[in-house]
Amino acid sequence: MEFIPKEQFMPAGTDFVLPETARPRVKGNGAWSRFRKNKSSVAAAAVIGALLVFALLAPMLSPYDVSSRDGYYKNALPKVSALSFLGWDGCMRRSCSQAACDYYRGIGLESGDPAVKAVKSQTRDENTGRFHYELRIDTYGQVGFQYVDLPAAEYEALRAYEEETGIQVCYPLPRYYQTVFLAVPGRANLWYRLADESKFTTGEAQNHDPNGEAAYVADYLLDENGEPVYAVANQTGYRCRVLYSAYYRYQTGHDPVHPFGTNQHGQDILVCLAYGARLSFLLALGVSVINFFIGIAYGAAEGYYGGKLDLVMERFSDILAAVPFIVVATLFQLHLAKRAGPVGALLFAFVLTGWIGIASRVRTQFYRFKNAEYVLSSRTLGASDGRLIFRHILPNALGTIITGTILMIPGVIFSESMLSYLGIVNLEASRLTSIGTMLSAGRAYLGSFPHILFFPAAFIALLQISFNLFGNGLRDALNPTLGQE
């Protein structure tokens, strides 16, 4: 045998770099390298991260919370000032009569902020002579004016705020505010009388001026000096008439703007969606972690020991798997929710049978690896059962187990949404909501206000698609038979 002379060996030096092909690669690095090659999985992971950040940060950055409700701004459309050129301006198209058109125009004429942003069309009925309009209405501006009852001290503070800021909040009271207008919805906006009421009764146009300004004559309540009255005393203090958008800004310190709009209760949809996503993520992660450990313990015992123990444990899991999940969830909500709460009862329902899939996956992997050469060698050297399970078999099976656990997250979120949508689980409270609850509530408004349903539906659809793509990439990356190590 010939040996290489030692003179041919030279020190590598400090600047020597080991070639890429010769570098040792651990299994984790190989998995990350394979995962990065799957562009759709990387994009899906980025989307999941963005949704998670949204759920965590949106409530912190928004001036609203789930308990913030305003009945005047219910069903308001999404509005973002920077995106108004794209139609994200809180406006909607509305068909109305001449009287309704006069009503909406009157709001803008008195406040200076028009509720009617555009007149799309104007047609006249040949039979009745009445006009019909297609208007683009600001769903925030249409609230206009409202009556509020304030204690004397708060009324004085409001008037001081007007003087300090120069922003008018209180407006004169209409002359018939206590009588005729009392039973009329939006009566605080009827501050005017028409210049020629006969034209209204005959169906003719109130005014041929496109703005309709000449048709409106102020009809305010006047005092003995002929001056408009801004407030009248009552049992609690004063009743005054306010421009509600200015009054809202006075109370909250910010304008009534909702990027995703509001629901039927006047709640900000963006914040409700973030709170619902928080609940869904926390519930899904909690269920996945609990089922992960239960499934590993149960499946490892089945797969490692086998025999009669495996036979008995498999029959037990088969019995549990045969019980429909919806029946389990319903029974738990009926009998356990009173003690553990709806979230706790739902968590128990998911855990009761959710670990069976992971246990089956672990059992299969243990049957695959427990008779491998390296396991037999370790057993021959005297390794204990615990060492064989946790040091030799389980690490090789973790890739498949982790993938199955992660893919359980979207399944839990979808199941929770389904149960809430069907009304089996009620997760709506003063400071709590869920994606399924939002979907269920928005179902009745699909034809009139589709944005209430659109945003939670888009969120859960995007989440499901992203998790499926992410799970596929993760499965391929953690499978050691794919790619080169």
Image: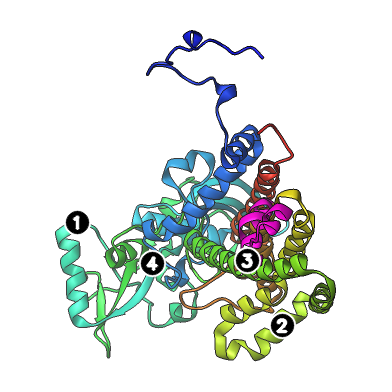
Q: Callout 3 environment at 10 Å: few (<14), some (14 to 19), or many (20+)? A: few
- Give the left or right position of residue 102, taking residue 426 as reference: left
Residue type at mark 4? Phe
- The mark that comes first in sequence, 1 or 3, is 1
Q: Callout 1 environment at 10 Å: few (<14), some (14 to 19), or many (20+)? A: few
Q: Nearer the viewer, mark 3 or mark 4?
A: 3
Report x, y in % for residue 485: 65, 34
- The mark that comes first in sequence, 3 or 4, is 4
Residue at which label 3 appears: 386
Q: Nearer the viewer, mark 2 or mark 4?
A: 2
Magenta stretch: give its range.
375-399
Marks 3 and 2, how far apart at CA: 39 Å
Residue at which label 1 appears: 166
Q: Nearer the viewer, mark 1 or mark 3?
A: 3
Q: Which element is circle 4 on? A: strand
- The mark that comes first in sequence, 1 or 4, is 4
User: Can residue 407 be spotted in the picture?
Assistant: no
Marks 2 and 4, how far apart at CA: 47 Å
Say if mark 3 contacts mark 4, CB within 8 Å.
Answer: no
Residue type at mark 1? Gly
Q: Which element is circle 1 on? A: loop
Residue type at mark 2? Thr
- The mark that comes first in sequence, 1 or 2, is 1
- The mark that comes first in sequence, 2 or 4, is 4
Tell me the tag on residue 281: none
Residue at which label 4 appears: 145
Q: Callout 2 environment at 10 Å: few (<14), some (14 to 19), or many (20+)? A: some
Q: Is residue 389 magenta?
A: yes
Q: Which element is circle 2 on? A: helix
Marks 1 and 3, how far apart at CA: 77 Å
Tell me the tag on residue 330: 2
